[in-house]
Amino acid sequence: MSKILVTGVDGQVGCRLARQLLSKNYEVRGTILNEPPYANRLKGLNLELMTGDLTDPAFAAYAVDGVDAVLHTANLVRADAFENNILATFNVVKAPAARANALHGLVYVSSSAVYPNDSDVLACEYHPVDERHPCRPIGAYPLSKLIGEETVWAFARASGLAASIIRPSCIVSGDGVLEIWSVSSVCGTMRKGANHLQSELYAPEAGEPWKELRRRATSDDQPCAVTDLQGRSWVCQLVDARDVAHGILCALESNAARGEMFNISALQPIPYTEAAAILAELTATDVLEYRAPVRWVYDLDNTKARSLIGYAPKWGIRDMIEDALAFRQGKTDGLM
């Protein structure tokens, strides 16, 4: 196995995956759209780039031809991209299935949104959410990812293609991690949960607690150490884009990955109390401690990936916040 196709190679995961593949001496072919908005992420990389649209079956077949494995990261994270994501995945999977015996395998990047595991709209069946949790996607994008999964399994069953699927939790890169622990984010989550009867946050007797929180805050960006009335911290288990790339590599290189799906998430669920304290320390701001009438839990059990394919997430919350601040200050490109 030497030449690997990375679809969407200029994406937040694809560009980091390309770097990790090149560091292990793989040849990398990548697909990008015409006039890709993030072409700067590929600067200096020794890649074979193909420009085109994966919804075109001829282009997808051309991109797959001659490679040893396919890592399908390309997708559009928009509600109006439903047809695009389904058709692109169909074409990308159909092409290697036609020559399954000549391929080492295919890894499809899905999403934990297929469960879903962020409980502000629909309560989870249990916590932490593992791969056995029922899939109940909400909205067009999660549905497109679940249909993509079924497309992968359908072609794998028919052709013998060695396929595997990963389901990352909320992927962060650049400075995206900084907003999650803010007063604005906490208010938005409570407000969203209050509008969904089946949410874990639905509590009409609590009124509108986000209004009180906003009144107490010095700004919408203030770090918020939010707990429930029993003192239990809210938690969010996001994942650094570099760890997602690492998880894809683990699935590619492990024979145990064949026919399996894996949750890919951070080292552990991250308490808001911990993240807010770190953010306040590093930005010299004050933490707002707030006891909410509800508790938000966004978790994703990655035990299977750790034990079966050697997934070893590297970036904890302090690392992610430090890197995000450096990126925001222009001290790094945030890619390494």
Image (cartoon, rainbow, N blue to C red):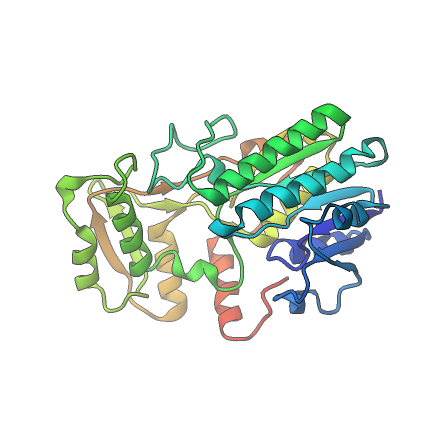
> For the point 66% across and 67% down, which residue is it?
35
Is 134 located above or below residue 324 in the figure? Answer: above
Query: Image quadrant of residue 31?
Result: bottom right
Q: Is residue 285 left or right of residue 8?
A: left
Foreground pick, 56 / 137: 56
Is 220 located above or below residue 241 in the figure? Answer: below
Q: Is residue 243 left or right of residue 208?
A: right
> For the point 80% across and 32% down, which residue is it?
100
> For the point 82% across and 53% down, which residue is it?
25
Q: Quadrant of the C terminus?
A: bottom right
The image position of residue 253, as x and y in percent, is 74, 39
Is 202 located above or below residue 185 in the figure? Answer: above
The image position of residue 138, as x and y in percent, is 42, 39
Foreground pick, 22 / 36: 36
Foreground pick, 61 / 12: 61
Foreground pick, 200 / 21: 200
Residue 259 appears in the figure: no
Query: Image quadrant of residue 199?
Result: top left
